[in-house]
Image: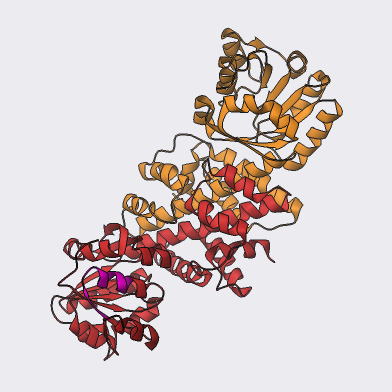
Chain colours: A orange, B red
């Protein structure tokens, strides 16, 4: 773990990701400031010695580095803008890092605003979920200027175990979109394969084990495949988040003028799962949509 | 490698899989008999000391174990039936193993015919391609009775490194179908993800490397993803074979009354690749269909 003593870091958004991330930063020696829509986690972390803020503006004013970790593009928009937003609290030389999973076009616009305020921007969405946040084993996919990335690296290495500078501003969100394409589709592939086996009267557990030695092997077959067989759909990562991310992917593809037929079909399956009332299931619950039961 | 001295084994079908498999059986000590539609590989292996047959009947008559390794369901049908077919050459106590990738319903019918002749049946399709056949590292997915599987195990262990008895007759083909679902769809997922990154102006090689540490990791991202980035579409496994296998999967799903929406969309993408004239490309060439170029 890097040594963050001397750093003042604000964390905005204290959900199941933001809380453990704030704790890991504090453990590394940073003075951590926090703000969130819901008062409970703010009070919790204040009780652990962090500095609580009612609004993003005062937090941004108080720290050198602002981390935003909220649910979606609209939420980042609200956090950044307005008279109590992050941008209103910025002054020359601060660093703003959006670690939420958000849209690429909006990310590039936010970066321009932050740079206009004399500050640096990184988009740095993560993969690895709550467990990765707690164990500081997140994969961090960073986009932004070289000097900004170099500045943030000790912070990223405190939060994750695999940190990659993908490219310029927005590249982190593009990489996360690519990640969600692969994860979302592979989940459906494993679900359809195991369902096919079960309906054909063959033990899906034995099929899964046999297939793991060949080209079908994946982290999804290993982890989520096991969950599907155990019918363990406790999250983990919510199906609703996967659908949100895939909607963003398809919007990006549309802006780029490309068709992604597999992900488009896959999106429908996630929508079906949520329409069935299973949005709170783990992503491995996609097998319920395949089974249609 | 198991010791197959004392075994007489016939191999019918001497394509890029059958030839190295026959050689591995001979190397393990078996007396190997061969037959194939095209005369060249028969002559080649006869020159290496194997016994050549003009028709499947005389081969089946001469050996204790018959392996069929041909391109598809129709080809197995032709090899088994007719006055010069395998079944015409069977007598009590032989073992017939279909290692081709074929349809489940037809497999069960063939097994009934072979058992009616007093012989044993195994369906044992493989995964791992020509390299796996040459290096004897194939994954073998076997369906059939326990005693038949136990009898064939030394043979399977000569041909492959991961041998699984999935279940009863037909279960091997069901497992292979599940494998092809996962592989076909994961290939498309990786192709769409890397194309999205490239079109968004981000280096797909860097995205691939970053994603390998998370939930998106798979053998396909590792091996075929690298091929996509290097634009190395020399086979490997042909796209036409993938389409044939997916057509069989969808026919099986239809017989079972289940919908597999992701694989149905994926089938269209493979069809598109072949319609573009790229059927001879490696499976990683699916990215050409996504790029639509």
Residue B98: tell me if it is visible: yes
Q: Residue at x 74, y 26 (%)?
A: A96
Quarter holding residue A32: top right
The N terminus of chain B is located in which quarter?
A: bottom left
The C terminus of chain B is located in which quarter?
A: bottom right
- Residue B160 percent across, percent down from the top left: 31, 61
The residue closer to the viewer here, A259 or A143, is: A143
* Position of residue A118 in the picture relative to residue A58 (left or right): right
The residue closer to the viewer here, B144 or B237, is: B237
Quarter holding residue A200: bottom left
Extreme-left residue of the structure: B92
* Position of residue A248 in the picture relative to residue B144 (left or right): right
Quick check: is B27 in the magenta stretch?
Answer: yes
Highlighted magenta segment, given as a residue range: B21-33
- Residue A190 percent across, percent down from the top left: 45, 51
Instruction: Tell me if residue A142 comes above or below residue B202 in the rendering.
Output: above
Instruction: Tell me if residue A132 comes above or below residue B163 in the rendering.
Output: above
Numbered circles on residues, count: 0
Q: Residue at x 75, y 24 (%)?
A: A95
Instruction: Tell me if residue A70 comes above or below residue A60 in the rendering.
Output: below
The residue closer to the viewer here, B177 or A160, is: A160
Extreme-front residue of the structure: B48
- Residue B19 percent across, percent down from the top left: 36, 75
Residue A178: tell me if it is visible: no
* Position of residue B285 in the picture relative to residue B260 (left or right): right
């Amino acid at each position: 773990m890097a040594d963050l003593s001397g750093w003042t870091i604000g964390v905005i958004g204290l959900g199941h990701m933001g809380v453990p991330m704030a704790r890991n930063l504090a453990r590394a020696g940073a003075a951590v400031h926090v703000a969130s829509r819901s008062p409970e986690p703010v009070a919790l972390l204040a009780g652990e010695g962090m500095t609580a803020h009612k609004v993003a503006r005062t937090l941004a004013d108080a720290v050198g580095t602002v981390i935003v970790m909220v649910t979606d593009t609209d939420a980042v928009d609200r956090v950044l803008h307005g008279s109590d937003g992050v941008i209103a609290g910025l002054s020359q030389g601060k660093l703003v890092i959006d670690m939420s999973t958000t849209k690429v076009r909006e990310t590039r616009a936010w970066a321009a605003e932050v740079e206009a305020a004399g500050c640096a921007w990184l988009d740095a969405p993560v993969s690895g979920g709550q467990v990765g946040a707690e164990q500081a084993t997140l994969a961090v996919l960073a986009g932004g200027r070289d000097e900004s990335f170099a500045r943030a690296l000790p912070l990223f290495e405190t939060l994750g175990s695999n940190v990659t500078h993908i490219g310029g501003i927005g590249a982190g969100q593009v990489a996360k979109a690519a990640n969600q394409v692969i994860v979302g589709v592979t989940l459906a592939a494993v679900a359809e394969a195991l369902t096919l086996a079960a309906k054909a009267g063959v033990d899906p557990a034995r099929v899964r084990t046999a297939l793991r030695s060949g080209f079908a092997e994946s982290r999804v077959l290993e982890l989520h495949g096991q969950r599907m067989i155990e019918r363990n759909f406790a999250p983990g990562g919510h199906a609703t988040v996967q659908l949100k991310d895939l909607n963003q992917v398809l919007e990006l593809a549309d802006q780029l003028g490309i068709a992604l037929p597999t992900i488009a079909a896959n999106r429908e399956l996630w929508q079906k799962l949520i329409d069935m009332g299973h949005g709170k299931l783990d992503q491995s619950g996609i097998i319920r949509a395949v089974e249609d039961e």
